[in-house]
Amino acid sequence: MQGPGDETPRVRRRGAVTVLAVLLAAAVHSCGPRGSGDVVTFWAFGVEGEHVAKLIPEFERRNPGIRVHVQMIPWNAAHEKLLTAFAGGSLPDMWQLGNTWIPEFTTLNAIEDLGPWLARSRTLRPSCYFPGIWDTNLMDSVLFGIPWYVDTRVLFYRSDLLAAVGYAAPPKSWDEWFDVCARLKRAHPDRYGVFFSTNNEWAPPVIMGLQEHSPLLKERNTRGDFSGPEFVRATQAFDRFFTNAWAPVKTTQIVNVFQAFAEGYFAMYITGPWNIGEFSRRLPDSLQDRWMTAPLPGPDGGIGLSTAGGSSLVMFRGSHHKEEVWKLIEFLSEPAEQLEFYRLTGNLPARREAWGDSALASNRYAAAFFTQFEHVVATPKVPEWEQIAQKAREYIELITMDQYTVGEGLAALDREVDIILAKRRWLVRGE
């Protein structure tokens, strides 16, 4: 069935851009007609696919005549399967899409402009969502996804260890962050203030760059701007944790983060909502009232920015069941269904209204996330972003290991990023 967006033309795998040109050539074949009776096909990834199927019977009860087939796909296979399905013209009617993947699939012209659908909706509007999260679904002001669940990074900390060095509350600025780390180091020279998993994690140094208002990329997102003054300041600050031995350089020596946190090997850790449950389960009972979460400290005080993460629901531009798909998107976006999905998976709801429910209000660890979601921003909206992020991780790790100075490392990073974005520069010049 066709709908109001039909006349509108329109993650996580590294190196996806290398297949972009081939897939663009196949685009003409990917949007052809495909029918499956009255069945809506929905691909969801990992545990989300397992649990969302439990919500579907209620949707089908409310919408007689519509049937939904949910296919669960492992996260590590999701990106490849989507690209293969696109090339073969066999994408589902709707699917879950990590919001950093949205730029890639809009470039492929695979997903529907949802603006016309939103305009007629009686239940959805942009104000239902955190502004930074909503923005991740916009490309050139066009809406391509509806946030389904959200994540970001906050500070997990040992409140007892901070209190022992004079901090009854977590740090509110970078200067306080440095000070509490210095105090912890003086109190326990063989331990650390904070742990950054630099061997597989790009988020903390990039977050600090965003807090300094670095654009990360420049010239219409066609060149790196990591050697710009904003990101240089952020990297110099990040490197202080290592030059002062406030954070361990050889992070591979920490085999079990939860055990190291419990033993006080480090007192602070930047991570996401998935670790609320893990810390609650894996830390001993004696520590359950000695750890807490807090919004990230900003450079000059107040709440610092963090990344806008999560997954969205998107509609296949070539679907023949668009009316039905939109009904399903609206259903899964209802606050009650968002809360039920939270209970099933632990994924934090995208709808702000859902956060007033006692299930979340009573979770003291989730409160910091709600506050942080009001202070999140999207990373650059280019298909190559995850490849770029991994390069940033590699070079910043080399800086922390004294293989490069900050200036040398970030200049080398920009050269690598410029190579990654070479095709993008060619496409922009051709506009």
Image (cartoon, rainbow, N blue to C red):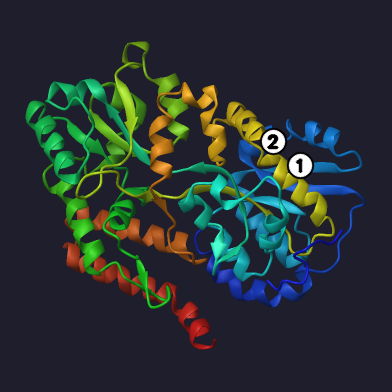
Q: Position of residue 92 (x, y in %)?
A: 76, 54
**For this rendering, which residue is in front, 362 or 229?**
362
| Residue 154 falls in image quadrant | top left
Image-based side of 208 in relation to 338, left or right: left
**For this rendering, which residue is in front, 74 or 113?**
113
Are there few (<14), some (14-19), or many (20+) residues within 10 Å of tag 1? some
Task: Return the mark for residue 245.
Answer: none
Residue type highlighted by circle 2: Val
Q: Which quarter of the rendering shows the C terminus?
A: bottom right
The residue that label 1 is drawn on is: 70
Q: Which residue is situated farthest in the left direction here?
A: 186
| Residue 394 falls in image quadrant | bottom left
Q: Residue at x 56, y 45 (%)?
A: 128
Residue type highlighted by circle 1: Val
SS state under label 1: strand
Query: Is disc 2 in contact with disc 1, using a CB cutoff of under 8 Å?
Result: yes
Above or below, 334 against 5 in this view is above
User: Going from the N terminus, do you reach mark 2 or mark 1 first?
Assistant: 2
Image-based side of 182 in relation to 83, left or right: left
Above or below, 6 against 302 in this view is below
Q: Does residue 256 show up?
A: no
Q: Which quarter of the rendering shows the N terminus?
A: bottom right
Above or below, 50 against 290 in this view is below
**For this rendering, which residue is in front, 403 or 156?**
156
Q: Position of residue 260 (x, y in %)?
A: 29, 27
Q: Residue at x 80, y 60 (%)?
A: 319
How many numbered marks appear? 2
Q: Residue at x 47, y 34 (%)?
A: 274
Q: Position of residue 326 (x, y in %)?
A: 75, 51
Are there few (<14), some (14-19), or many (20+) residues within 10 Å of tag 2? some
The residue that label 2 is drawn on is: 52
